[in-house]
């Protein structure tokens, strides 16, 4: 197990077209892409969704190897989802059957669609964090949730917490990897045995990881207090979010494309 391969929440600085796109539009388009994946119905819709993802990855200048790392941690979940769809999807064309288990053509097609949907969903979401800095994410989420201020929702605090939580994922993964390496040097075994034994071996890892997480949280809170941080009231920004004309063009073009894919999916294409 190599925790360093987990890239969830990491940001890779760059100057690509995707990096320069307004972060508010990136968040909205990512959410719309996820919705479109669930509305896609046929092979054509999935191929277009995959093509859009590949184009975005190419424009972002993020390597496919890095995107694959974002999907690797959920490999077990993908496998379980595929098995459940293969054996428990009802269908008329039965290819194999034993007791309550049966494999149908519909089940295999459903498993393929589900695997493709999960992979594209995770990869598309990862591109958002790969190309958007934590500060941009915080400002974008706060801007998108700003109408909720009318009903006295602490928008800035919520967006700050979401951004910090996302930013701390790579830090905690790195800390867990260091603790695991230290325990391996002392004779701990995380690789051998069945699943239950491996899970049990991970328990000693949780205690120092939780202590480290609370220590980092306390240090962050102290640093924010020392800088007189008092929430969103009266806060100013060095760089204000301002969408360029090309951002509007890209957003509405992709929006129309997603709408076309959704309509095609409803007709089974």
Image (cartoon, rainbow, N blue to C red):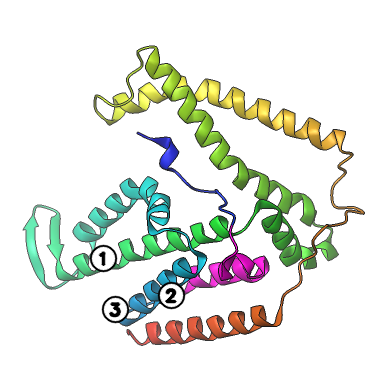
Determine which quarter of the picture holds residue 268: bottom left
Instruction: Say the numbered circle drawn on residue 36.
Output: none
Whether residue 67 sits left or right of residue 143 in the image: it is left
In the drawing, does residue 179 fall left or right of residue 143?
Answer: left
Disc 1/disc 3 C-alpha distance (Å) = 10 Å
SS at badge 2:
helix
Q: Residue at x 72, y 66 (%)?
A: 144
206 part of magenta stretch: no
- Mark 1 / mark 3, whichever is N-terminal: 3
Q: CA distance from mark 2 to mark 3?
A: 14 Å
Q: Is residue 27 above or below residue 67?
A: below
Split into 4 quadrants, where in the image is the N terminus? top left
Q: Which residue is mark 1?
A: 112
Contact check, label 1 and label 3, Cβ < 8 Å: no
- Please identify the dominant SS of the magenta region: helix
Q: Residue furthest front?
A: 15
In front: mark 1 or mark 2?
2
Q: Which residues are magenta?
A: 14-39
Say which residue label 2 marks: 52
Q: Report the Cα–Cα distance between label 1 and label 2.
A: 19 Å
Q: Position of residue 156 (x, y in %)?
A: 78, 54
Q: CB of mark 1 within 8 Å of CB of mark 2?
A: no
Percent coordinates x, y for residue 94 in the rendering: 10, 67
- Left or right: where does residue 25 sit relative to residue 60? right
Q: Which mark is residue 43?
A: 3
Residue at 80% from the left image edge and 57% from the top image edge: 153
Of residues 49 and 267, which is closer to you in this image? 49
């Amino acid at each position: 197990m190599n925790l360093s391969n987990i890239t969830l929440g990491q940001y890779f600085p760059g100057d690509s077209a995707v990096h320069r796109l307004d972060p508010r539009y990136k968040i909205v388009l990512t959410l719309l892409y996820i919705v479109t994946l669930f509305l896609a119905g046929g092979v054509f819709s999935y191929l277009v969704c995959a093509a859009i993802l590949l184009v975005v990855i190419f424009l972002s200048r993020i390597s496919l190897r890095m995107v694959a790392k974002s999907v690797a941690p959920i490999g077990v979940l993908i496998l379980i989802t595929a098995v459940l769809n293969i054996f428990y999807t009802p269908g008329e064309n039965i290819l194999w059957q034993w007791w309550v288990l049966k494999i149908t053509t519909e089940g295999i097609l459903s498993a393929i669609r589900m695997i493709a949907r999960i992979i594209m969903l995770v990869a598309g979401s990862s591109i958002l964090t790969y190309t958007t800095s934590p500060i941009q994410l915080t400002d974008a989420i706060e801007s998108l949730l700003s109408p909720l201020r009318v009903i006295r929702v602490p928008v800035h605090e919520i967006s700050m917490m979401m951004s910090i939580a996302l930013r701390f994922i790579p830090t905690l993964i790195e800390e867990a990897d260091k603790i695991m390496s230290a325990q391996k040097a002392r004779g701990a075994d995380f690789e051998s045995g069945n699943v239950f034994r491996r899970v049990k071996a991970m328990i000693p890892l949780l205690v120092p990881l939780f202590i480290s997480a609370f220590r980092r949280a306390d240090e962050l809170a102290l640093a924010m207090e020392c800088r007189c941080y008092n929430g969103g009231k009266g806060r100013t920004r060095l760089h204000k979010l301002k969408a360029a004309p090309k951002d509007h063009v890209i957003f509405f073009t992709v929006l129309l494309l997603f709408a076309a894919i959704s309509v095609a999916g409803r007709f089974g294409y």
